[in-house]
């Protein structure tokens, strides 16, 4: 489940199916894994971070992913077209883990 809670008017959450039904955009990116490998010109279809955060007045977001990995990001660094959550790559759907995108965001 993708959820947003904290400094928002109302907490929101989406199941994987609801999340992947949000408007998407296609982007081409390079994927690099530290010094191990790179994959160039990878096409992604993703939900822009702007979509679920529309109307949020927070300055920061704490992202929690599967495995309880967390990071704090300035919302201005990931909005205005600078961030997205991939739903498919190179025309193949991205498999969900237990039916969820596995991301929870807390704004502050």
Image (tube, rainbow, N blue to C red):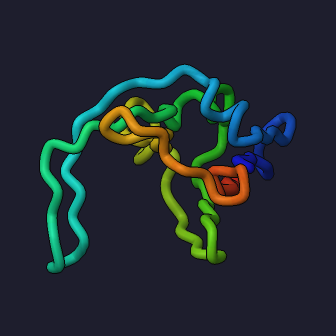
Question: In the figure, 25 relative to 78: above or below?
Answer: above
Residue 97 in percent (x, y) is at 64, 59
Residue 34 in percent (x, y) is at 22, 76
Residue 92 in percent (x, y) is at 41, 38
Question: Toward which corner of the image does residue 103 lie, by quadrant?
Answer: bottom right
Residue 10 in percent (x, y) is at 86, 36
Q: Residue at x 71, y 50 (%)?
A: 99
Q: Is residue 82 left or right of residue 96?
A: left
Question: Toward which corner of the image does residue 104 lie, by quadrant?
Answer: bottom right
Q: Residue at x 13, y 50 (%)?
A: 40
- Residue 83 seen in the figure: yes
Front position in the image: 27 or 61: 27
Front position in the image: 80 or 16: 16
How many discs mark residues in the rendered view?
A: 0
Front position in the image: 97 or 46: 97
Q: Residue at x 49, y 53 (%)?
A: 74
- Residue 107 seen in the figure: no
- Residue placed furthest toward the right: 10
Q: Is residue 4 left or right of residue 80?
A: right
- Residue placed furthest toward the front: 92
Quarter holding the C terminus is: bottom right
Front position in the image: 29 or 51: 29
């Amino acid at each position: 489940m993708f959820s947003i809670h904290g400094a928002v008017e109302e907490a929101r959450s989406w199941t994987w199916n609801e999340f992947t039904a949000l408007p998407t955009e296609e982007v081409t990116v390079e994927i690099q894994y530290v010094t191990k490998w790179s994959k160039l010109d990878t096409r992604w279809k993703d939900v822009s971070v702007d979509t679920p955060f529309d109307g949020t007045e927070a300055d920061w977001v704490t992202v929690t992913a599967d495995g309880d990995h967390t990071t704090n990001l300035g919302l201005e660094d990931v909005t205005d077209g600078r961030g997205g959550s991939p739903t498919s790559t190179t025309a193949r759907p991205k498999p969900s883990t237990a039916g969820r995108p596995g991301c929870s965001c807390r704004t502050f």
